[in-house]
Amino acid sequence: MSRIIRALFVLVCPIVLLAQESVTLSGQLLDQETQEPLPFANVAVHQFEDDALVSGAISNETGRFEILELPFGKYRLYFSFLGFETTERTLVAGGLNTIFDFGEIELAPSAL
């Protein structure tokens, strides 16, 4: 019986370790002036070193977004919406924290 338990442990441990090498990002995009949600706004994730696009998402009707299974690394996140200034955040993903909630991200209307 103990051999079976050890065998299961050896098989399951690598799967658990591999599953923890990615992170989940989430947040909500809002209009800075009115505090209204920004539906269908863009979220772009770029490599920090070379600014290459890695992943992205579009916010839902309530301005919320979620990006799943982003590999550990250092990233620049760009939040944009037509008629608003683009906002940028830096993320260093790694270690024990696998869920990053940016909370409310406010975009300022552009001065056109």
Image (cartoon, grey):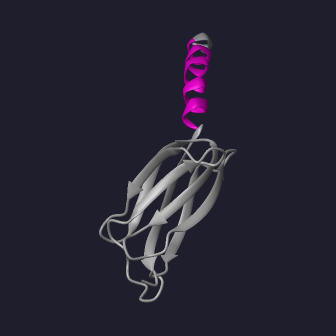
Total marks shown come to 0
What percent of the width, then of the height, locates residue 88? 57, 65
Depth check, front residue: 79 or 104: 79
Depth check, front residue: 101 or 107: 107
What percent of the width, then of the height, locates residue 58? 36, 59
Residue at the image position 58 percent from the left and 14 percent from the top: 7
Residue at the image position 60 percent from the left and 21 percent from the top: 9
Q: In which quarter of the image is the C terminus?
A: bottom left
Give above or below for 43 relative to 21. below
What percent of the width, then of the height, locates residue 51? 58, 48
Q: In which quarter of the image is the N terminus?
A: top right
Report the predominant secondary structure element of the magenta stretch: helix
What percent of the width, then of the height, locates residue 44? 47, 55
Q: Is 13 on the left-hand or right-hand side of 27?
A: right
Inspect the magenta stretch and tell me whether residue 15 lies in it.
Answer: yes
Depth check, front residue: 16 or 39: 39
Point out the stretch of residues depicted in magenta: 4-20
Give above or below for 10 relative to 83. above
Inspect the magenta stretch and tell me whether residue 19 lies in it.
Answer: yes
Direction right: furthest residue: 95
Direction front: furthest residue: 112
